[in-house]
Image (cartoon, helix red, strand yellow):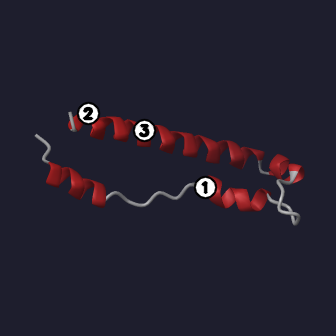
Amino acid sequence: MMTLEKLLELLKNLPPVHLEIIDLTWKLVGEDGKLDEQKISFYYTEIEKATAQAESYAKETADLIRCLTSLNR
């Protein structure tokens, strides 16, 4: 059985996550601070990959929250 102490230790040791979408966003902004449509077209493939990564991270985070919430019951 998983103890609270063991669970907390596992959570502390999770590696940090770097989402590519954050870095990519800076590449998509023009000098006026707005999204640049030409840059969006140029980086389309990278945007798709970064979006998939962010969606996967969000789903896994939601799954973890559900799991942790169920332990509290």
Q: Secondary structure at mark 3?
A: helix
Give the residue at the far left of this rendering.
Answer: 1
**Quarter holding residue 68:** top left
> Where is residue 12 shown, x and y percent of the image?
29, 60
Q: Which mark is residue 20?
A: 1
Residue 27: give x, y in percent of width and height. Answer: 76, 61
Q: Secondary structure at mark 1?
A: helix
* N-terminal-most mark, 1 or 3: 1
Identified by mark 3, the residue type is: Ala
Using a 10 Å C-alpha cutoff, classify the residue at mark 2 as few (fewer than 14 neighbours), some (14 to 19) or many (20 or more): few
Side of 66 relative to 56 (left or right): left
Q: Amino acid at mark 2?
A: Ser
Dot 1 crowding, Cα within 10 Å, few <14, some 14–19, many 20+:
some
Q: Is 25 rendered above or below residue 68? A: below
The residue lying at 22 percent from left, 38 percent from top is: 72
The mark that comes first in sequence, 2 or 3, is 3
Amino acid bearing label 1:
Glu
According to the picture, the residue beneath numbered tag 3 turns out to be 62
Q: Are marks 1 and 3 in contact (CB under 8 Å)?
A: no
> Dot 3, how many residues are within 10 Å of its Cα: few (below 14), some (14-19), or many (20+)?
few
